[in-house]
C-alpha cells in the first residue's frame, strides 16, 4: 500500500471516529437547518463526511435525542420526519460551543508538542 493510500485510510478512520463520537451534535446541526427523515440524515452525513453510517448507528441516537425532548417526530407518507425542538436548539448551541472549546484546547495541546508542517 502506498503512503498516500495509508494516509487516506487513516484520515477516513479519524473522520469516521469523529462523526460517531459527535453524532448527536451533527444530527442537531442538520436539524437546525431543516427537518429531515432518517435516510436523509444518513445521506447528508455520507455526502458531507464521506462516511457511510448504518441505520443501527443513527436510530438509537435519534431515539435518545427524542427521549430527551431535543427532537420531535412527525409522520408524513409513512416516513418519520425529525425536527429540532426549542430545547434542542438551546442544547445544540451549548454543545457546539463546548465542542469548539474542546477542539481549540486539543489543537493547542498538539501544536505545542509537535512540529507540524
Image: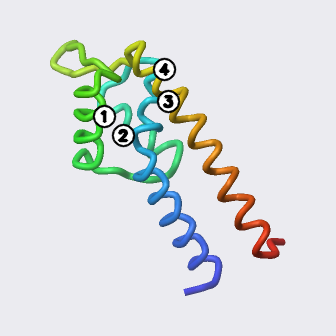
Instruction: Residue at 48% x, 66% y: name it.
Output: 13
Determine contact: label 3, label 4, CB under 8 Å.
Answer: no
Coordinates of residue 52 in the picture (x, y in percent) = 38, 52
Crowdedness of circle 4 by 10 Å Cα count: few (<14), some, many (20+)?
few
Q: Which residue is mark 3?
A: 29
Coordinates of residue 16 in the picture (x, y in percent) = 45, 58
| Mark 3 and mark 4: Cα distance apart in space | 11 Å
**Left or right of 11 on screen, residue 63:** left
Q: Which residue is mark 1?
A: 39
Sooner in the amino-acid sequence: mark 3 or mark 2: 3
Determine contact: label 2, label 1, CB under 8 Å.
Answer: yes
**Left or right of 68 on screen, residue 99:** right
| Mark 3 and mark 2: Cα distance apart in space | 13 Å
| Camera-nearest residue between 99 and 3 | 99
Instruction: Residue at 60% x, 35% y: name it.
Output: 97
In front: label 2 or label 4: 4
Residue 42, which numbered label?
2
Quadrant for the C terminus in the image: bottom right
Coordinates of residue 101 in the picture (x, y in percent) = 65, 44
| Camera-nearest residue between 48 and 59 | 59
Please tell me whether mark 2 sits on a helix, a strand or a loop: helix
Crowdedness of circle 3 by 10 Å Cα count: few (<14), some, many (20+)?
some
| Mark 2 and mark 1: Cα distance apart in space | 5 Å
Amino acid at each position: 500500500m502506498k503512503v498516500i493510500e495509508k494516509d487516506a485510510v487513516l484520515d477516513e478512520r479519524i473522520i469516521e471516529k469523529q462523526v460517531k463520537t459527535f453524532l448527536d451534535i451533527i444530527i442537531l446541526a442538520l436539524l437546525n437547518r431543516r427537518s429531515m427523515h432518517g435516510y436523509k440524515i444518513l445521506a447528508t452525513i455520507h455526502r458531507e463526511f464521506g462516511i457511510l453510517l448504518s441505520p443501527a448507528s443513527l436510530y438509537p441516537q435519534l431515539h435518545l435525542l427524542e427521549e430527551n425532548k431535543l427532537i420531535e417526530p412527525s409522520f408524513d407518507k409513512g416516513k418519520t420526519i425529525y425536527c429540532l425542538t426549542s430545547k434542542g436548539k438551546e442544547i445544540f448551541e451549548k454543545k457546539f460551543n463546548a465542542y469548539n472549546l474542546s477542539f481549540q484546547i486539543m489543537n493547542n495541546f498538539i501544536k505545542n508538542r509537535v512540529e507540524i508542517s
